[in-house]
């Protein structure tokens, strides 16, 4: 029987932050692996996709086939793509999907960033077969997984993804999202009852006061959202590049205190590179 899981390969936001002060939680930018039976889905291609590619090349002996979903085309979410080793092996097949953009727009966007003179190789001409595809708000299916998109509150637009699995489990991936009174009720309804919510938590409440309008959340917002939506487990994600492991340890304590003080019935954890969730 095949194992099914979600694995974090990059949990940092905005800019990679390698070094001893970020080693425990991780310094790579967003990348999530979803493996379900024979279906492989990759959410975002931040620098975390590089170690994922190395791992896939090691553990999959035959041809690799996967779907890469971009929440949005900001650099921290796509800059790892040219360092994704499986792209350079003939026979591998990838579908690259970005909401609310046509296939031609996605291809042009990537050629404008990951090609000469900014990068030595044109990523659209890799040895692997790459298919570009747009995604509307209407649900689609990849393998046995149903996928829906939701427009978040983020400059330039970012999209959350909801994955519904045949075993009845639901995962929501919300990488870049700022609190919004306009979208709150819609988002609450959309994520209601999810088994797992992964949500942007870039700032502390104090930091957020100075960063309103930057498109990211203070950590107490996704906790309140998850509790109101009866989410079973929340994973905080997309940490600020200046936030050290020592600071995140303090955030962990503050988060659990906040949950207790508010009387919320939701489990909350901080995501880390290498962390795996079984579906």
Image (spheres, rainbow, N blue to C red):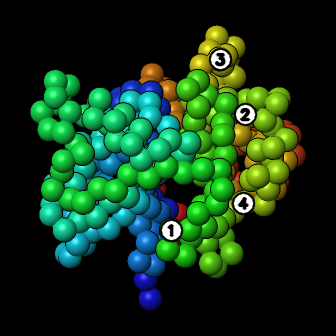
Residue at 55% of width from left, 76% of height from top? 144
The image position of residue 142, as x and y in percent, is: 50, 68
**Which residue was labeled with disc 3?**
213
Q: Earlier in the sequence, mark 4 or mark 2?
A: 4
Q: Quadrant of residue 207?
A: top right
Question: Which quadrant is the N terminus positioned in?
Answer: bottom left
* Image-quadrant location for residue 82: top left
**Residue 92 picture location, percent across and down:** 23, 65
Instruction: Give neighbour class at mark 2: few <14, some 14-19, many 20+ (Cα, 10 Å).
Output: some
Say which element carries label 3: loop
Lower position in the chain sequence, tag 3 or tag 1: 1
Return the x and y of residue 183 as percentages of the image width and height.
Answer: 78, 35
In front of the other: 32 or 150: 150
Of badges 3 and 2, the one in the foreground is 3
Q: Earlier in the sequence, mark 3 or mark 4?
A: 4
Instruction: Tell me the residue that label 4 is attached to.
Output: 194
Above/below status of 7 relative to 136: below
For label 1, the residue is 142
Find the distance from the CA under tag 3 to the CA under tag 2.
17 Å
């Amino acid at each position: 029987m095949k194992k099914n899981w979600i694995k974090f390969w990059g949990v940092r936001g905005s800019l990679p932050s390698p070094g001893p002060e970020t080693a425990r939680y991780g310094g790579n930018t967003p990348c999530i692996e979803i493996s379900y039976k024979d279906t492989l889905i990759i959410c975002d291609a931040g620098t975390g996709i590089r170690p994922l590619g190395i791992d896939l090349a090691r553990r999959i002996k035959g041809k690799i086939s996967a779907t890469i979903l971009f929440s949005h085309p900001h650099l921290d979410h796509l800059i790892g793509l040219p360092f994704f080793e499986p792209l350079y092996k003939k026979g591998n097949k990838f579908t690259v999907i970005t909401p609310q953009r046509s296939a031609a727009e996605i291809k042009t966007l990537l050629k404008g960033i990951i090609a000469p003179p900014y990068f030595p190789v044109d990523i659209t001409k890799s040895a692997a077969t790459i298919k570009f595809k747009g995604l509307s708000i209407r649900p689609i299916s990849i393998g046995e997984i149903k996928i829906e998109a939701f427009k978040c509150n983020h400059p330039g637009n970012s999209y959350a993804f909801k994955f519904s699995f045949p075993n009845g489990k639901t995962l929501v991936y919300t990488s870049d999202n700022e609190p919004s009174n306009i979208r709150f009720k819609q988002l609450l309804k959309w994520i209601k009852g999810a088994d797992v919510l992964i949500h942007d938590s870039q700032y502390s409440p104090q930091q957020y006061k100075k960063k309103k309008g930057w498109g990211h959340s203070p950590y107490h917002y996704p906790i309140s959202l998850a509790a109101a939506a009866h989410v079973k487990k929340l994973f905080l994600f997309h940490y600020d590049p200046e936030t050290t492991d020592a600071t995140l340890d303090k955030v962990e304590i503050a988060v659990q205190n906040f949950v207790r003080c508010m009387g919320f019935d939701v489990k909350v954890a901080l995501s880390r590179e290498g962390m795996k969730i079984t579906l």
